[in-house]
Amino acid sequence: MKLAFLTHEPFYPPSGGGSAEAVYLVQELVRRNHVVHLFCPRLDDGGQIAKQFGIHIYEFTAWKMGRYTSLRNLKYLAYPIFLQRMVERAALSIQFDVVLSQHAISAVAAGRLKKRLRVPVVMNFLDYLTGFMETWPRYIAPRTFIKALERFELSMPNRYGADGVMTVSDTLADYFANAGYPRERILPIYYGYDSELFKHSTDTAKDEPPVIVMHGSFDRHHLGPIALEALRIVTAAKPNVRFRFVGKETSALIRFRQRVTATVTNVQIECTGFVPYSEVARHLATASVGIVPYEESTGTHCAFVAKIVEYLGLGLPVVSTPLNSARRYFGDEPAVRFSEFHGEDFGKLILGWLEEPREKRRALGRAASQRVKSELDWRAISRKAIDFVERIQLQQGRV
């Protein structure tokens, strides 16, 4: 089939967050001999990347896109209009068989294209985007406005008549079903990791000094009062502990570090700056514990946190706040411990892991690594996702 693949993130190399998934979905499509037409923001070398992956690439060049670009949210709001036009121009000479969108932003364009192109549309939601805004300050994100955006995001599959929906978690699937979209047309595919990059190693940290690690895009909901209090608790009990933050030093991370150093005596923090997806694992592998101190919101409860998967892939024990989607999937995983939504409890769980014998942590880590490798490697998730897309296309589209 000829497939239009829509995303608001630069395709390659992955920039973090949900962007890594697109690479593996495209590889699975090409492996099955489907023709992929990728519509995305400008790439550093689009021609070479198209050749490398065996796809056709159409680049948006009106302005720079990406999770760290200036005026990001305004650009995201405008992008679907231009994305729709790009696909419509291509459709003048290409008869697409299906449109697949990544994330809510591209889903807007995909929904409008369904009526225009009269082809099946599958929307892949890697998070509940507007739900994260609940943790933003009210002067930036008034609650009535955020609730309206949340309702719109959940309404998109029904509003545009999507033929199928994939979600990052069972919790997000519940939200779409409760909004009236047929449950039988929703497939939770979760979020994966590359087991070739995030390999469990016997050469683990010696715990002297212990290193507590967190990686990601460091948005507002990642680093708040819970993380601040946890660092205070841990540092007071074990002053030699180091906290390592792997990822771009965003304004949220810079502000958090300033608050920590101003209020926590003798805290030891290191920030790596931006690290390509292919190199993240080596910064995590020497740590003692991986953490997910997310503040509570609808968005975080719906997220299937990549951090947990990647920590476990490397064999690291994990402390996380009790995110609904994570607890539903990892609730019986001994290598993951869930705190309450406050920093004191979170900090005590970190200390609890550090008090465990190293051999016990390593044994739990090995077992967890094997479990996520069998269930959540990107290849397994991609097969499941593309099976679903093919089934939708056969049922609703041109055979």
Image: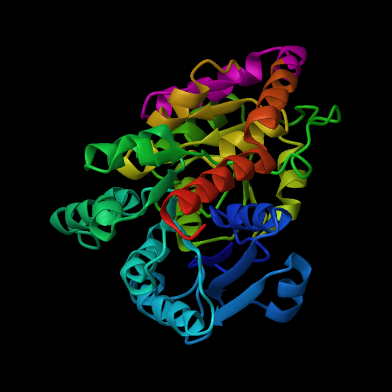
Camera-side residue of 341 and 228: 341
Which residue is located at x 36 percent, y 48 percent?
128
Q: Which residues are magenta?
A: 335-363
Give residue 185's position: percent from left, percent from top: 37, 41
Position of 82 relative to 9 (above/below): below
Q: Is residue 140 left or right of residue 64?
A: left
Using the rendered view, name the quadrant where residue 372 is placed: top right
Is 349 left, or right, of 104 in this rendering?
right
Q: Residue pushed farthest front? A: 399
In the rendered image, the vertical position of residue 211 relative to residue 130, given as above or below? above
Residue 357 shown in magenta: yes
Q: Using the image, determine if residue 372 lies above or below residue 89.
A: above
Is residue 347 part of the magenta span, yes or no? yes
Q: Position of residue 132 (x, y in %)?
A: 34, 50
In the image: residue 323, left or right of residue 139: right
Q: Is residue 56 above or below residue 389?
A: below
Query: Which residue is depicted at the point 65% across and 34% down?
Result: 311
> For residue 171, what is the image quadrant?
top left
Q: Nearer the viewer, residue 331 or 218?
A: 331
Q: Residue at x 28, y 60 (%)?
A: 160
Q: Which x, y percent locates residue 319? A: 53, 27
